[in-house]
């Protein structure tokens, strides 16, 4: 086992870094953390998001644990299918957004997501340990769909109960269980 503590790479969803979001709060508490930088252009481009993950990974030395939320989980699936994943020891994929089904008002349509390269969602086994943490009442992903993503990616599924989309809009800020799941991956 590698004795070097892993760097935590935060991969936010399409809304990027949000104050009081559990990822933002987690990043402030951890000693070795890097967040994927917000995009200035091509904000809906899946390829630009994958490239942002790849650029962040290129700056890191030693092992990495990825902590992704929402569409960030889908970004990681796309990235893992196309890039060198050798630094990654594990990934926490929380509240994955099901971009293949219609999203609530205010989110990009399935057609727009398809135009920007998000579809289909990769369903290849991830080449590293992973945990999908899913809500039973997430407005962006039915639990059955999250279960299917976990199976396809070879991930352990952790059912969180009724926590919505696990974001400030659903009444969540701190998510202390994230640290427990990260420890499990290390």
Image: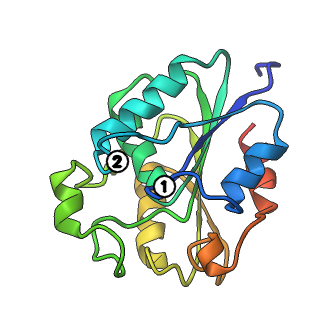
Vertical relation: 104 (above or below) 99: below
Q: Tell me the mark number nearer the camera, choosing from 1 and 2.
A: 2
Where residue 114 appears, x then y in whole percent?
A: 18, 57
Q: Is residue 125 visible?
A: no
The residue wearing badge 2 is 43
* Quadrant of the rendering where the N terminus is positioned: top right
Vertical relation: 68 (above or below) 49: below
Question: For this rendering, which residue is in front, 115 or 81?
Answer: 115
Residue 169 occupies quadrant: bottom right
Where residue 97 appears, x then y in whole percent?
A: 43, 65
Where residue 172 appears, x then y in whole percent?
A: 70, 73
Q: Distance between the residues labelled 1 and 2?
A: 11 Å
Residue at image coords 38%, 67%: 98
Question: For this rendering, which residue is in front, 79 or 49?
Answer: 49
Residue 77 occupies quadrant: top left
Which badge, 1 or 2, is on the more N-terminal residue? 1
Q: What element carries label 1?
A: loop
Q: Can residue 170 be seen in this view?
A: yes
- Crowdedness near tag 2: few (<14), some (14–19) or many (≥20) residues, C-alpha within 10 Å: some
* Quadrant of the rendering where the C terminus is positioned: top right
Residue at image coords 48%, 52%: 73
């Amino acid at each position: 086992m590698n004795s070097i503590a892993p760097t935590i790479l935060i991969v936010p969803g399409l809304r990027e870094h949000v104050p009081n979001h559990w990822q933002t709060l987690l990043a402030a508490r951890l000693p070795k953390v890097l967040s994927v930088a917000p995009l200035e252009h091509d904000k809906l481009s899946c390829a630009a998001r994958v490239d942002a993950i790849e650029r962040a990974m290129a700056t890191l030395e030693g092992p990495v644990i990825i902590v992704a939320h929402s569409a960030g989980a889908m970004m990681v699936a796309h990235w893992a299918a196309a890039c060198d994943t050798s630094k990654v020891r594990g990934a926490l994929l929380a509240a994955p957004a099901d971009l293949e089904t219609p999203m609530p008002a205010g989110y990009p349509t399935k057609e727009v997501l398809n135009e920007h390269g998000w579809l289909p969602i990769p369903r290849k086994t991830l080449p590293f340990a992973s945990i999908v943490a899913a809500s039973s009442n997430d407005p962006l992903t039915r639990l059955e769909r999250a279960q299917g993503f976990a199976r396809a990616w070879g991930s352990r599924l952790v059912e969180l109960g009724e926590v919505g989309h696990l974001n400030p809009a659903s009444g969540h800020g701190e998510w202390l269980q994230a640290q427990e799941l990260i420890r499990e991956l290390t």
